[in-house]
Image (cartoon, coloured by chain):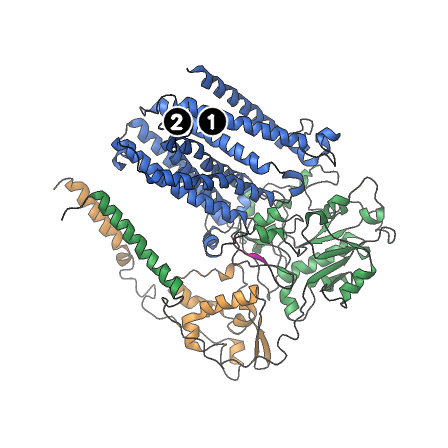
Amino acid sequence: MTINRRDFLKIAGISAVLGFGEFTAYELLRPGELFAKTPAPPKGTAAAPPQDAGLRALTANRWAMAVDARKFNSPEDVQKCSDACKRTHNVPTFDDARRDVNWLRTATFDQTFPGLTDDRITDALIKKPYAALCNHCGDPPCVRACPTGATFKRKDGIVAMDYHRCIGCRMCMAACPYGARSFNFSDPREHIKEFNREFPTRTKGVVEKCTFCSERLQKGLLPACVEASGGAVTVGDIADPKSEISTLLAANYSIRRRLELGTEPGVYYIIAPDTVNPAENSTPNFDKNSTRNSDGKSRKENVVAPRREERKNSDGKSKKGGK
Amino acid sequence: MYDKTKIIALIVIFLALLFYPVYYNLGKAEERKLGIMPEPSLETPAIQQMKVRQCVKPRQYMRESHMQLLDRWRDLALRDNDREIGVIDGVRYERSLQNTCMHCHSNKREFCDRCHIYSDVRVYCWDCHIAP
Amino acid sequence: MLEKALGGGKLYWGWMTFLLVVFIVGFKYYLRQFGAGMALTGLGREVSYGLYASQFMFFAGVSASTIAVTAAHHLQIGKTPGRVAVLAEFLSAVSAIISVVFLIANLGQPTRLLNLLFYPAFNSPLFWVLTAMTINFALNISIGWAALHAQYKDVTPPDWIVLAVYVSIPCALSIPIFISFMYSTAAGTSTAVYAITAARYLASSFAGGLLHLYVFCFALKTVSKYDLGEGALKTLGTYAVIALVLNFVFMAMQMVTMPGTALTFFAGGTLSAHPMASQLYSPTYIEGSVVHGIWAMGLMILTVLYRVTVAVRAKA
């Protein structure tokens, strides 16, 4: 039998497509049946969950945080919270300001509230440090931008990260108006000061941010920054009118960051322009990792070009291309 | 035959590549421990203290499907925030690789690595999760 | 027809070898990035997108832009640019591949690339860009192959090409629009994205892509005996110039209606009062180097515009 080359290729192509498509079609019609079956896990092998399972977890309908900016007078106050967060979650510290990974950072007034900056603002506001972190927005642009759903909004209002699914495209970093997200440009393990062995690290190539300590909430513990702040930071359920945070916000004037963008942030900053004085000798810009001075010019000494030595292994041998 | 030299040369190269694994391992079965079943070790302090040595699931299920279990736990814990599994021997456990699984199996090199190195499965859990 | 790719003189094989060497060197450096992480790119927390992302968007736009030539030729709208249409289709397919390669190079975890397929997020503009590009690529490569084969055998192309071109028009036009959606998720939304962004992206993609095609066809005409058809280059140049002019018009309109601190140019605000505008365009803002780059690019584009217009008007 003779067959034309074109016809042969056409038949081969169609057979290949049918061959592949058959699997898909079967999978669509009868999902799961084509895989070798693993036996269903037998019941009753582990002890039954205790009756009070889930009761010790802290839950809320809409988690929110109130940062009492009146109580943060010096950068060290905010640094306590930042360090607690870093210790609990194995967040690395880099010398090069460009690679900075930070879940809760110390920021100036005009970095935190860019729309509110003006020529003359009271020292009580402008000379203070502010804790800038992920706002766990009600309408988060990062969730909108993520192409794989690695960052997603939970029903209780926390914007969570799934580090297993993140492909590292950094669209969420571009989308976040608050600069809350950081990318691991290199392997973070070498740059972690103290390890918390109960929590994983991240690997290079994924984006990370504040997780609202959801694993601590599950155990009934408050977030690390709340504990370290000594009462300056409060978290709670803002949908519950009788919760501590609701009463706190009802009694004090608070603002949120960049409201005009419509993201519905969940972190409220209680400010009081006429009360507590800032620490002596404090200047508006104390974020030593910032690459910009307070007047907007770039601060060259904080931008360090990566040198070849940076890529050495911990035992001093140089790294080759692969791991 | 047309192009005899080219065809024979390419056939020889093809056969050489095809049988490369055979003569790479020829005579080295002892040294590379080929054909010897790996035995992961269960002797860790945490397991030795257990009254009844049992895991969250039976041994055969774990042998076959521990990765499926870990994937399901990962999605439940991270995406659905469902972290509790219960109390075993009076200790409350959650769905966590580092705190639950590796709490008992704290000998990663003698337990996880034995089989994974033998079957040449590159496990990247430890890129993020801290190995005990 | 593939046997044509194996026959060729010294120049051809020399060019192929050169491209292969470039490919191998690039791949070797990519492996370094794969091992050491994205820190090798010099990007940072405050500048997280660099050449990779910008080239991804550029080549996606180039891939979309060839629809002008393809539609004109196969649907017989306006002046037909002759056999340039086939080259346009292949340029579109190749640009789509280059664009996806830049996207992969931009990923921090490229081994998880298939997560884009397994867990598609329908609210993400990046997902839609990739979808539109894939459909456009599939259509263009099949149309291009069929048209080239028809040329090779000296027959008219098959009829389904017209239907395929009709389908590929909205796919191609939507690519720059989806890219502008990607841009509009950027955090500087209040300072960098305007109503005219989508239209501007369309115009600039078409300008860039058609000029790309022009250069490519010109090179082909110089180096080989391929017959492009009468006046094909001139028609192509005309389209490119129209797109360029539109691009500049949109840019100028955007600059003039860009608000200063609160007022637009006509209401009394100045460009230098607007931080983003002054960083991009103001000649007196010396601090950042990007201004020099933008003015240099602007001058280059104007030169190209002038030369192409002259060339187009010169031939009868």
**Which quarter of the image is occupied by the C terminus of chain C?**
top left
Residue carrying label 1: C239
Among numbered discs 2 and 1, the one appearing first in the sequence: 2
Residue sitting nearer the eye, B96 or C295: C295
**Amino acid beneath label 2:** Pro
The single residue placed furthest to the right in the displayed view is A274
Where disc 2 sits, the SS reads loop
Residue A281: x %, y % from top left: 83, 47
Residue A212: x %, y % from top left: 66, 61
Residue C4: x %, y % from top left: 27, 33
In the displayed structure image, the side of residue A263 where residue B125 appears, left or right? left
Cβ–Cβ under 8 Å for marks 2 and 1: yes
Residue A154 sits inside the magenta stretch: yes
Residue at horizontal 35%, vertical 30%? C15
Observer able to see residue C176: yes
Chain letter of disc 1?
Answer: C
Residue sitting nearer the eye, C217 or B107: C217
Identify by letter the chain in green.
A
> Label 2 crowding class (10 Å Cα cut-off): few <14, some 14-19, many 20+?
many
Residue carrying label 2: C81
Q: How many marks?
A: 2
Residue A73 - label: none
In the displayed structure image, the side of residue C147 where residue C60 appears, left or right? right
In the displayed structure image, the side of residue A293 where residue C130 appears, left or right? left
| Span highlighted in magenta in the image | A146-155
Residue sitting nearer the eye, C70 or B20: C70
Identify by letter the chain in blue.
C
Residue at horizontal 59%, vertical 40%? A305
| Most frequent secondary structure within the magenta stretch | loop
- Give the colour chain B carries in the figure: orange
